[in-house]
Amino acid sequence: MEIKILPQNITDAANRIENHIRKTPLEFSPYYSDMSGSKVWLKLENLQITGSFKARGAFNKVLLLSEQQKRGGCVTASSGNHGAASAYAMKELGIAGLVFVPEGTSSIKVDAIKRSGCEVRFFGKDGVDTENYARRYAAENKLTFLSPYNDEEVISGQGTCGKEIVSQLPQCDAVFVAIGGGGLISGVAAYMKSLLPDIQVIGCQPSASAVMTHSIKSGKIIDMISDPTLSDGTAGGIEEGAITFDLCQKYVDHYELVSEQQIKESMQTFIDVHRMLIEGAAGVALAGFLARKDLYKGKNVAIVVCGGNISRKTLASVI
């Protein structure tokens, strides 16, 4: 069955969550514009509630739960940002929650989840193993599972980021988005291509953990080992049968892989120039643009700076 994320789904999500999230700035970057010959705009989701775009999908999903589901409680799995966003949304709505995270998850992200009042448990080394375990745990204990990306309502929530970009930059020619499970780029692309059919959607991944890119090339979701990466927010495998695979096949025009050195240098430059913290996944999108900048001279380009949750240890290693 074909999954369709319709613009109306995303518009409904935007109306539903507007009192719970921030409409983040789309900031013009003189630096990236001058060095590329493009007009570059930065969608600052690092300034979003809980420090990443994930609040959009989490609130849309939780607000759509039935009263019975809310009373029963929820379980989710996350490398950090989805967990923090879901925990915050559940706290705001008075829902009991449990968050499973992979071993080695950034301490700043684990602490953010705990501050929101959710219990945190560790399971597995790869995000897909954590997700599979959390889904089984939810089923066995009659709890509602909140998927990080494999859910139409979560994807529609993430798509509100694309809706905002279109309203802020109606003549956008290309958008660069980091990919992990594919929830953000699926929602953003579904909305933006419905209004701007000629827009180029470029998915960016670290070479160390490029499961979606290799899956798309293989024509099916593949199981592969990921190496360590600064982009912990996009690291790990993809759940079998994930609806984002088909959406990425349909909407993403190009996949750009970047090295750890490219990610590090992009993070350094952004921190120096824009004086804000970003996490590795945001550095991936910036690095992806820099690798392809010569193709967009004179064009309006948006880069989604997807999050700013970085531990002091990782930050120290970057700077």
Image (spheres, grey):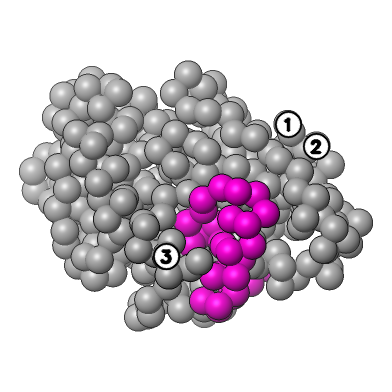
Task: Look at the numbered disc 1 and give the secondary structure of its residue.
Answer: helix
Q: Is residue 168 toward the left or the right of residue 44 in the image?
A: right
Mark sitting earlier along the chain (3/2): 2
Q: Is residue 274 toward the left or the right of residue 181 in the image?
A: right
Residue 91 can be seen, yes or no? yes
Structural crowding at the residue carrying mark 2, measured as other residues with C-alpha within 10 Å and reported as few (<14), some (14–19) or many (≥20): few
Q: Position of residue 277 (x, y in %)?
A: 51, 50
Q: Position of residue 105 (x, y in %)?
A: 28, 61
Task: Look at the numbered disc 3 and give the secondary structure of its residue.
Answer: helix
Tell me which amino acid carries mark 2.
Pro
Tell me, yes or no, whether the highlighted magenta stretch contains residue 281: yes
Tell me which amino acid carries mark 3.
Ala
Residue under the point 37% across and 68% down: 236
Q: Which of the 4 image quadrants contains residue 231?
A: bottom left
Residue 167 vertical position relative to residue 226 in the rendered view, above or below:
above
State how far apart marks 3 and 1 are (Cα). 37 Å
Q: Nearer the viewer, mark 3 or mark 2?
A: 3
Q: Which residues are magenta?
A: 254-283
Tell me, yes or no, whether the highlighted magenta stretch contains residue 4: no
Q: What residue did someone put label 1 on? A: 167
Labels 1 and 2 touching (C-beta < 8 A): yes
Residue under the point 31% across and 51% down: 108
Nearest the eye: 6 or 180: 180
Q: Main secondary structure of the magenta part?
A: helix
Structural crowding at the residue carrying mark 1, measured as other residues with C-alpha within 10 Å and reported as few (<14), some (14–19) or many (≥20): few
The circle drawn on residue 316 is 3
Q: What residue did someone put label 2 on? A: 170
